[in-house]
Image (tube, grey):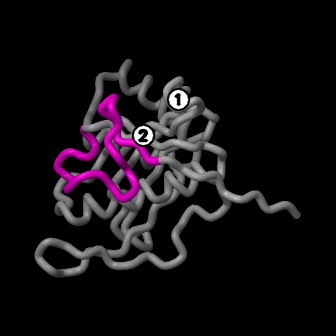
Amino acid sequence: MSATFPPDPSPVPRADGAAAPPLRVRLGQGADAALVANWLDQLQPLPVPAARARALMLGDLLGQSGRGICLLACGAPDREGLLACLPVALLPSLELAGLAACASEWWVRPGLDAATQRACLEACCAMLADWGRAHGIRHALLAPGLVTGHGGAPPGFRLQGNGMWHRSLAPAAKALG
């Protein structure tokens, strides 16, 4: 997917009626490793061995190695820095008969109001759906804990019998040439 930013970010309504700054969601790249690692270390410091393991996993996601991706929500145009991070793993699903993009973690900058947190989650899930369709991934899954406290599941997600939130993704049309 070549475009990683939505073309025109729009203000996010907040509970107090004011508009939060516009959001941009993009696929994390290898060049983001230091930025994201430092941000995660500020949110949840780890002992050295665990920090090294997290850095290796993060590098794998940011390198888009085929095992997953990392979606980054930023204040537009990055004036507010990193607001949220949604790591996504690609997992085989026997129930769904294919690969599923599964998000089981949700990292949010402390102090964000509920409306901005919700907007970040919805924007990340919309980008995940676009990315999944473009890469032949037909299912997106969210862990139940990601939805808790965010006013319900993002649009298009339905609760599965296994407890995960599921969204079917129709494949994107291929353009040749």
Q: What residue type is labelled 2?
A: Leu
- Residue 127 x/y as whole percent: 49, 57
Total number of numbered discs in the rendering? 2
Count residues near mark 2 (Cα–Cα under 10 Å), then give few for <14, some for 14-19, many for 20+. Answer: many
Q: Residue at 51% of width from left, 58% of height from top?
A: 26
Front residue of this view, candidates 176 and 47: 176
Tell me what residue is drawn at x 36 percent, y 22 percent: 50
Residue assigned mark 2: 141
Q: Are there few (<14), some (14-19), or many (20+) residues within 10 Å of tag 1?
A: some
Residue sticking out furthest to the top: 49
Earlier in the chain: of badge 2 and badge 1, it is: 1
> Tag 1: residue type?
Leu
Callout 2 touching callout 1 (CB < 8 Å): yes
Is residue 152 covered in magenta?
Answer: yes
Residue at the location (51% across, 42% down)? 139
Q: Nearer the viewer, residue 95 or 74?
A: 95
At a point 46% along the width and 59% down the height, the residue shown is 126
Figure quadrant of the N terminus: bottom right
Quadrant hosting residue 72: bottom left
Q: Please tell me whether residue 81 is drawn above or below residue 12 in the rendered image.
A: above
Q: Main secondary structure of the magenta part?
A: loop
Which portion, as a residue range, is magenta? 145-167
Task: Provide residue 75's location: percent of width, then percent of height.
Answer: 37, 68
Q: Image quarter for residue 155?
A: bottom left
Residue 84 magenta-highlighted: no
Q: Quadrant of the C terminus?
A: bottom right
- Disc number at residue 91? 1
Asked if residue 32 is positioned above or below residue 99 in the image, the reply reads below
* Residue nearer the viewer, 40 or 164: 164
Numbered disc 1: secondary structure? strand
Q: In which quarter of the image is residue 124?
A: bottom left
